[in-house]
Amino acid sequence: MTSANETTSVADTTGESVSYTDSSHDQSGVDYEGPRMHHLRLALKKTRKKCVDSLKYSVFARKYQFAHETSPRVLQKILEEFKEQLDNNIKVELEEMIRQENLVPLFHNLDLLSKDSTTEDSALAWRPSGVPQADVRDHLHQVKLAEKEKLQKLLEATEEETKRLCVIVDRKKKHLAETQQKIQNHLDFFDQMRAYDACSHVPSSEILDNLIFGEDSSR
């Protein structure tokens, strides 16, 4: 049956080709399986194959030695049928697990979130090149950049604190200068008051004599 939806074909490690449709639903009504769900199925298929292939004829021959000695071909056929049945049982169990855990829509939503969060401005993360010297240099460069950014922030914070302290010191100096001026004004006032008090205690006759003698001496 030919589908109108776009079909993508990917070869798994077993050499088989596995296809999935690029739409919300296929013709059978099965939910769309995106790339992540597709890769999960490939991984499960590879694991299932390795598990089944681990059943060797030598194990059966050791366990069923009488059959191996009398009818090795029959035992080999039994082994193949057993492996096929085991593979089908595992496949059914995995499909049931995927259905119960509702993995298809979950992986589909994950594909959509990943697609929506990916932008052209996304920064590429550092990856090792395989050359130890270059990797160490690049790694240290990233560390130095992070340390530089940290020190830059510390410097900016220190400069801001210094400016704040300078403003406080200037305010204190201004207040101290005003206080000193007030004290000086009070001292000048007290000096004037002492001079006035001294003049008020001098007899008027003495003042007149000083004025008269002063005029005579000037003549």
Image: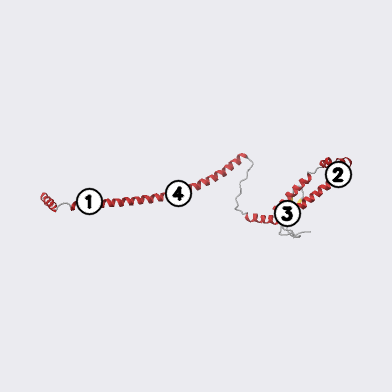
Secondary structure of residue under mark 3: helix
Q: Residue at x 41, y 49 (%)?
A: 166
Residue designated by label 2: 75
Q: Amino acid at mark 1?
A: Arg
- Is label 1 or label 2 in front? 1
Q: Earlier in the sequence, mark 2 or mark 3?
A: 2
Q: Amino acid at mark 3?
A: Ile
**Residue that protrudes farthest toward the front in the picture:** 201
Q: Residue at x 22, y 51 (%)?
A: 194
In front of the other: 211 or 118: 211
Distance CA(mark 1)–CA(mark 3): 106 Å
Q: Amino acid at mark 4?
A: Glu
Distance CA(mark 1)–CA(mark 4): 49 Å
In front of the other: 150 or 99: 99
Distance CA(mark 3)–CA(mark 4): 59 Å
Residue designated by label 3: 98
- Is label 3 or label 4 in front? 3
